[in-house]
Amino acid sequence: MPKKTNITVNNRDYYRVTATIGKNADGKPIRKQFYGDSKKAAESKRDEYMAGLKKGLSVDYDKAVFGVVFKHWFEHIHRHAHNVSLSSYTRYEIIYRLYIADCALSGMRLISIKSSNIEAMYNSLKTTPNNIHNINKLLKIFFNRCVEDGALIKNPLPAKEKLPEVIQSDLTNTALTDLDIKKLITAAKADIKHFPYVFACFTGLRAGELLALNYKDLDFKDDMISVDKSVKYFTIDGEYQPIVSRPKTKGSIRRVPILPEIKSLLLAHINHVRQLHKVISISGDFLLFPSDAGTYRDSGNFLKTFKRLCDKLDITEGCTVHSLRHSFCTMLARRGVSLLEASRLMGHSSVNTTANIYSHVSDDDKKIAVQELAAYFN
């Protein structure tokens, strides 16, 4: 017995049913048509769709395609979210461009994506476990938004335990040795252009925080530095430019003391910069650590210069600018500064981050600390 149909489209027979799925802004009913090879098939599609609406899904949720929706969300919504820093967005843009834009999910409808599809996509990517976790973080934000907007009922991401394991390195503290630090100080005293690295070592500032410092951030009366911003270069709309931003966490906004020895070198450095850039009078916006052109210095250039200095001074291989920050924290640990106070000076969002560096003080430091207990026997 032939199937009963009621409409022909492109020379093919279908059965069509219609349902009211809501009302428009004028209060008029919105009608949607459902097609099937038979009346039963068309009604099944209608009933499934209507059940989705009752669960809170948005109208036309069945038409949403992953690639199209993700691109719109990433470029027009996520980019301007208040809780997303420019640096985070830039990192995610690379992840999107390399691993998501043309992935196996691109042509799939959102409602059809299952955790098995995402697992298969992850398994097909030739990248590191750490990158897989970063891709998963971005997809989690996206799918959660889809649920909030009624495009999905639940987030289809696979369980965290199904992701590849990330091997955490124990080498979290790359602090310089005391000998290396003394080499830096000697180099700065001989040539003040090396001072920025000594300054970083004895203040614990991040590279972006240091390179964003202005003269107005210095309080010579109380010998303190105010840290409330950071600078980093990004390519935006095809232009490579410095972007100054507020710290991501409240803990990063802080005041850090300046040692008298650092203060004297800092004054010499400021005088050097003034002469180099022919600055007659210093205003509050005067950059403390500018590029040769007098603009914000790029952190990549700052690192390359430090690497060359390390090679010249025969400083421990593998050190980075961040090693100077770890050196500051380690020196605090060696001298018994409390974990909480060190965390405040470092601008860490969590004491646990500081504790991780504190746990890497050497055995000799630990022995010296324990020897202090000998006082009980005197």
Image (tube, helix red, strand yellow):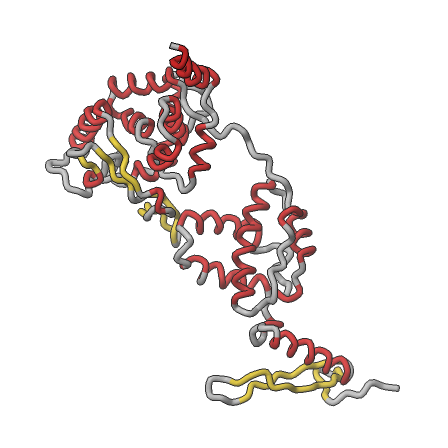
Residue 234 seen from this side? yes
Front residue (pair 50, 91): 50
Q: In this image, 206 relative to 290: left or right?
A: right
Foreground of the two, 301 or 225: 225
* Side (left or right) of 277 relative to 45: left
Q: Residue at x 65, y 83 (%)?
A: 33
Quarter of the figure that contains the N terminus = bottom right
Q: Position of residue 75 (x, y in %)?
A: 46, 60
Q: Is residue 306 visible?
A: no
Image position, residue 342 (x, y; %) = 36, 32
Tell me what residue is drawn at x 41 percent, y 11 percent.
377
The image quarter in which residue 200 lies = top left
Residue drawn at (49%, 50%) of the image: 92
In which quarter of the view is residue 306 placed?
top left
**At which x and y percent is residue 77?**
45, 62
Q: Does residue 29 lie above or below 213 as drawn? A: below
369 lies left or right of 11: left
Q: Is residue 158 left or right of residue 85?
A: right
Query: Which residue is situated farthest in the left direction here?
Result: 280
